[in-house]
Amino acid sequence: MAACVAALAAAVTLSACGAKTDSGTSSDKAVKADTSGDTVKVGLLNSLSGTMAISEVTVRDSVKLAIEEINASGGVLGKKIKPISEDGASDWPTFAEKAQKLIKEDRVAATFGCWTSASRKAVKPVFEKNKSPLFYPVQYEGLEQSPYIFYTGATTNQQITPALDYLKSQGKKSLYLVGSDYVFPRTANKIIKAYAKANGMTIKGEDYAPLGSTEFSTISNKVKAAKADAVFNTLNGDSNVAFFKEYKSAGLTAKSMPVLSVSIAEEEVKSIGAQYLKGQLTSWNYYQTTEGAANTKFVKAYKAKYGKSKPTSDPMEAAYTSVYLWKAMVEKAGSFDVEKVKAAADGVTFEAPEGTVTVDGPTQHIHKTARIGEIGADGLITQVWDSGKPIKPDPFLKGYDWASGLS
């Protein structure tokens, strides 16, 4: 077992550094889902413990809500969905082991889960080798495409690029970059630096902290001394709690040096404390306050199940939506067969809480509306800008001249 874990850890390191991983070959065999009874099993793969639990538990809960709603309306192709939940424990080799278990032993028809790009890259070769689909619900750094992953969170041109465009429109000419030390923040910041160079913006500094770190006094002092116009924050998990407390202690405010975050949603705001975040900015595709009948229904149902004080957030909504998209793909295909479901995916739409979303078959990403929000004293995030319509996914930024060579 120790050798297996070491090998998995090495594979994650190679993947995170940009090395190629096993993307499935003609000799790989698909593991067929068990659909022999009156149920069909799906996997729920999230960190229910460790540093990422602050974010991932509620994502798991939103998937369970979608499953309950679908089952109450008759299920999928006449079968009720049976969820099998596994804990990735904020540990990337564990994610890979649990993915293998869900596919090989439980024989799930699909898996919904992961948060960090490190966890996604750890499981990517597992899903590809076994030709089993993963629905990944969180915004990420782009520059990736897999035949067995559906990306229902934002890719770069649906979150990071609109965020930079917004900061530029507000007259921000310099940025300080702060992130967790793993693949998403480092790749995102590589993209941000390319954008800045092409758009006359200066990068005043760039710092990383280990995932789960709670020591940010040095970084906060460096940010303060840099006197940038804004901070672009790609910290993940409970490191944000320590960072924003130190930020306030350093005398920095949303007015003096605003922070735009791409991994802090309503659930994290509640954990950090709205008093530390009031006036700060976020970039997502959905907020609890997003207008529309579908969102009103979603928020009401979620709070009725999990508690009136429980907020909804973008990753939760994307995870909830992904279950309905999978259902629509299966019903369009008339089968749980993975290849038939993939072939049916292009053009599948759903009236989601965030608005209408559509699957882009060639990339297996989703058309999504970009939204910039401001955090209020009540812990909710209010939209201050949106893209006006869903943005076609461009994970490799092929439509942006400044991004040439990033892949």
Image (cartoon, rainbow, N blue to C red):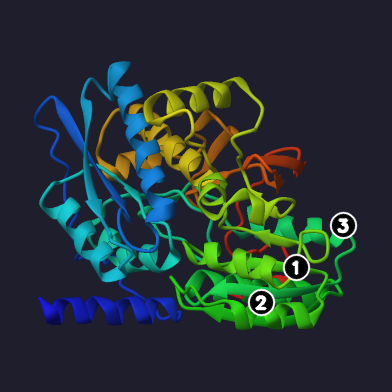
Q: Amino acid at mark 3?
A: Ser
Q: Are marks 1 and 2 in contact (CB under 8 Å)?
A: yes
The kind of secondary structure element at disc 1 is loop
Residue at numbered disc 1: 252
Q: Quadrant of the C terminus?
A: bottom right
260 relative to 350, above or below = below
| Mark 3–mark 2 CB contact (< 8 Å) | no
Mark 3–mark 2 Cα distance, whole angstroms, equals 26 Å
- Work out whether residue 327 or residue 227 is closer to the camera in this orientation and state it: 227
Mark seen at residue 169: 3
Residue under pointer 2: 220
Left or right: residue 389 compared with residue 117: right
Between the C-alphas of marks 1 and 2, the distance is 9 Å
The answer to which quarter of the image holds residue 99 is: bottom left
**Relative to the observer, which residue lies in front, 85 or 78?**
85
- Which mark sits nearer the N-terminus, 1 or 2? 2
In this view, 120 is above or below 193: above
Name the residue furthest right. 171
Q: Name the quadrant containing residue 337.
A: top left
Residue 359: give x, y in percent of width and height.
51, 41
**Picture coordinates of residue 11 (x, y %)?**
30, 78
> Residue 349: x and y, percent?
52, 31
- For the N terminus, the image quarter is bottom left
> Alpha-carbon neighbours of circle 3 within 10 Å: few (<14), some, or many (≥20)?
few
Label 1 CA crowd tier, 10 Å (few <14, some 14–19, many 20+): some
- The mark closer to the camera, 1 or 3, is 1
Along the polypeptide, which appears first: circle 1 or circle 3? Answer: 3
Describe the element under mark 2 as helix, strand or loop: helix
Residue lying at the far top of the rendered structure: 73
